Amino acid sequence: EHGRLLGLRRTIDVLFLGTMQVRRRRKAVAQLARSGIPVRTEGSWRGSETWGQNRLQLLNTTKILLNLSRHPGEFAGLRMILGMCNGALVISEPMDLPEPYEPGKHYIETPLVQMPDAIRYYLEHPAERQRIVDEAYRFVTEKLTLRTSIRKILEIAAMEAA
């Protein structure tokens, strides 16, 4: 539902997908730009440019998807899934409780001040970027599925009933 790999050439280095009507995000993108990291920003709750097939195409041509939260420490589960199931490396500000995701394994977590260096590193090291992307993709498509979640719930319910 949230995406799949299309095998497209990744032509967008860095993307933020979400509303830019949040002052904190505008400041973060401006700070990244001053550090030499141009960020393509797309998305809103209006219009169809970043929904459905358009979003699928956009994310499948993205190398790095940024998670810039509305508030420090905030968890953005949908943005994480969108990046991971469409083959983009998610680079995120620190989240207070990132579970079930593991920093360094499923995504990269770094403070905004260190984000330009992290972005440059993963753009310059595509094999390392791909290693994390592959692990994240496996995680969201094999372990973080509705079927797996329901099976775990039924196992817990069966143990409680016994």
Image (cartoon, rainbow, N blue to C red):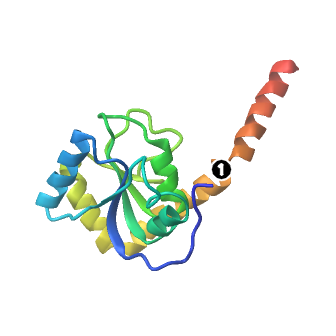
Is 131 on the left or on the right of 6, as rendered? Answer: left
> Is 94 situated above or below 116?
above
Q: Position of residue 37 (x, y in %)?
A: 20, 64
Horizontal side of residue 107 vs 123, given as left or right:
right
Please identify the quadrant where the N terminus is shown. bottom right
Q: Give the percent coordinates (x, y) of residue 11.
A: 37, 76
Q: Give residue 57's position: percent from left, percent from top.
A: 49, 69
Q: How far from the left and from the top, in percent, is residue 54?
A: 49, 65
Q: Which residue corresponds to the image point at 42% horizontal and 37% vertical from the top-left?
A: 75
The quadrant in which the C terminus is found is top right
- Can residue 87 be seen from the camera position used here? no
> From this viewpoint, is residue 9 visible?
yes
Disc tally is 1
Comparing 38 with 118, the one in front is: 38
Q: Nearer the viewer, residue 4 or 161?
A: 4
**Mark 1 crowd level (few <14, some 14–19, many ≥20, 10 Å Cα):** few
Q: Residue furthest left?
A: 34
Residue at 29% in and 73% down: 124
Q: Which one is in front, 21 or 69?
A: 21
Q: Which residue is mark 1?
A: 143
**Does 77 sit left or right of 43 as displayed?**
right
Circle 1 — which element? helix
Horizontally, residue 28 falls left or right of residue 125, namely left
Amino acid type at image mark 1: Lys
In the image, farthest residue toward the bottom? 9
- Vertical order, 18 against 162 (above or below): below
Image quarter of residue 91: bottom left
Residue in view at x 38 percent, y 33 percent: 96
Q: Residue furthest top?
A: 161
Q: Residue furthest front?
A: 47
What residue is shown at x 21% (from left), y 40% (from top)?
Answer: 23
